[in-house]
Image: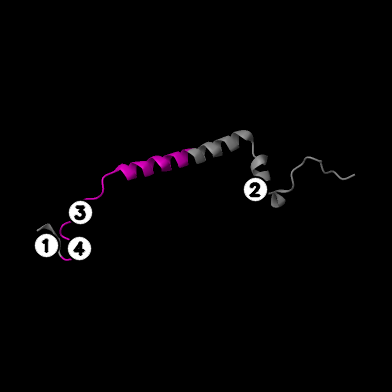
Amino acid sequence: MANSKPNSLPSPKNRTFLQSWLALPARTRLYVSLGVCVVAGTGIMISDFLENSPPPPHNLSTKTASGSASQNLA
């Protein structure tokens, strides 16, 4: 009989992503998952902050499509 165990994982070259993920220790998987959640939460907080920030001021010295800015004010 061969020396292979019935529940052993395939060699690292032949593993799927899920098998490689499950081969990691539970604590490592937890830390990676928490890191992904922190990055995602930070991104959501930054996008919310940017959505609520006031728009940049309108520069009156630039020309608009219909003419100069001073003509639009009159």
Q: Which mark is residue 17?
A: 2
Q: Residue at x 64, y 39 (%)?
A: 24
Distance from the alpha carbon under mark 3 to that under mark 1: 15 Å
Q: Residue furthest right?
A: 1
Q: Residue furthest top?
A: 27
Distance from the alpha carbon under mark 2 to that under mark 4: 54 Å
The residue pinned by badge 3 equals 58
Q: Position of residue 64 (x, y in %)?
A: 20, 63
Instruction: Judge the density around disc 2: few (<14), some (14-19), many (≥20) Cα neighbours within 10 Å.
Output: few
Secondary structure of the residue carrying tag 2 is helix
CB atoms of marks 4 and 3 within 8 Å = no
Distance from the alpha carbon under mark 4 to that under mark 3: 11 Å
Relative to 53, is 6 on the left or the right? right
Give the residues drawn in magenta, as a range: 38-67
CB atoms of marks 2 and 4 within 8 Å = no
Q: Which mark is residue 64?
A: 4
Q: Amino acid at mark 3?
A: His
Q: Quadrant of the C terminus?
A: bottom left
Give the mark nearest the N terminus, 2 or 3. 2
Secondary structure of the residue carrying tag 1 is helix
Q: Position of residue 21 (x, y in %)?
A: 64, 43
Distance from the alpha carbon under mark 2 to that under mark 3: 50 Å
Q: Amino acid at mark 2?
A: Phe
Give the mark nearest the N terminus, 2 or 1. 2
Q: Amino acid at mark 4?
A: Thr
Q: Residue at x 77, y 41 (%)?
A: 8
The residue pinned by badge 1 equals 71
Distance from the alpha carbon under mark 1 to that under mark 4: 10 Å
Give the mark nearest the N terminus, 2 or 4. 2
Give the mark nearest the N terminus, 4 or 3. 3
